[in-house]
Image: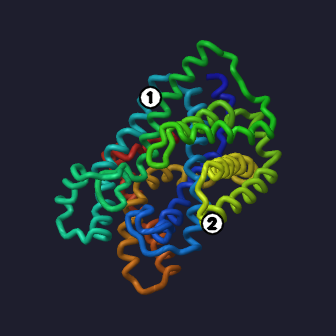
Amino acid sequence: MKEAANMGRNYYIDNLRWLAILLLFPFHAAQIWSGGEYSGFYIWSHTSTVFYVFSTAVYPWYMTFLFAIAGMSCKYSLLKRTSKQFVVERIKKLVIPFFFGLLVLIPIMTYTAEIFFNGYTGTYWQQYELFFTQKTDLTGYHGGFTPAHLWFLLYLFVISLMVLLIICLQKKCLPKFRVGSLSYFCLILLFVPEWFCLYALNIGGKSLGQFMLLFLFGYYILSEESILKKLQRYRLVSLLFFVMSGSLYTYLYCLKNIRNILMDGLYIFYGWMGIIMLLGIGQSKLNFHNRISIYLTQASFPVYILHMPILVVVGFFALQLSIGVAGQFLLIVLISFVATCLIYEIVKRMPVLRFFLGMTKEKL
């Protein structure tokens, strides 16, 4: 408790989190023009090199970053509450919104996909039955059951429980375990165990092993003040490695269509450099708070849950307008963002919906 009292709030973590959430609007809009019709999204127009490159460049680091800072937040959270309080909080914050979204929000997206790809003419409620009964690959991109973007909540809950067990065992067996003396070079090399863990419990391209390791890195390593100071000191080096590895990865993946185990390693290295680069630069440039940042910090979690069905529906209608790809993209991003914020403003004033969307005062 004394350690928690002495620890000032790291506002840059909140700011990095809501910036990552806001990035989901252009990222998911770009998916409409990325890859191919069967490579993955609920609506699809055609492949645009610009948007394909953009989405490829963002994907390796943005979700991994959220798991890493969730581990950091877990460290700060457990300094102020018991294990039982932590689990109850996770249920309210993650499990209840997951099932609410699964029942209420995600079927809207698969209904749109059924119409767009399959020419579906049935009612929404008939599709609702199909959502739970028809055979599916769990993506839902062409209809059928899927956790969609809420897989993050499910993974985060499972990982939180597993890591809590590890933490309890560590405190009992190795109570003085600390890793604050790692050099910057050793920090970079942490991408190697992450690479190995990429293949552990990899479900549909989303590795539980990889994300759990990143959560542990966040809890044990990235939350250490001495480590954070190193990341801040070498932030420009991290930025250089990030840009170089990201440019190479994106070029080889998009333009050369290379897929092999070495590309997996480059993918992991690029994503890991993104994490430590963002934490380094964030400390220098984003450690502030004001009315806007406080609002976006509070809104980021419900915005994550709400944004996808809104964006898919907006995209469905935007693709029918003859305003060019750039116009359609901008329209989707802007209308989706504004509509999501408006719905958030309505939801936060309704206690029942606040509960179902996990809108507590605590952060992830």
Q: Residue at coordinates 69% horizontally, 17% vertically from top-left?
A: 176
Colour setting:
rainbow
- Residue 46 in view here: yes
Instruction: Find numbered disc 1 in the image and state the secondary structure of the residue it sits on.
Output: helix
- Residue 79: x %, y % from top left: 59, 26
Q: Residue at coordinates 42% horizontally, 46% vertically from top-left?
A: 151
In this rendering, position of residue 301 left or right of residue 250: left
Instruction: Look at the image and tell me in which quarter the N terminus lies.
Output: top right
Of callouts 2 and 1, which one flags the residue occurring earlier in the amino acid sequence?
1
Q: Residue at coordinates 39% horizontally, 83% vertically from top-left?
A: 321
Q: Which residue is mark 1?
A: 87
Amino acid on which disc 1 is placed: Val
Q: Nearer the viewer, residue 54 or 224?
A: 54
From what the image shows, is residue 16 above or below residue 9? Answer: below
Q: Nearer the viewer, residue 230 or 246?
A: 246
Comparing marks 2 and 1, which lies closer to the viewer? 2
Instruction: Find numbered disc 2 in the image and state the secondary structure of the residue it sits on.
Output: loop
Amino acid on which disc 2 is placed: Lys
| Image disc number at residue 342 | none
Q: Residue at coordinates 53% horizontally, 36% vertically from top-left?
A: 209
- Residue 16 in view here: no
| Image disc number at residue 256 | 2
- Residue 196: x %, y % from top left: 61, 38
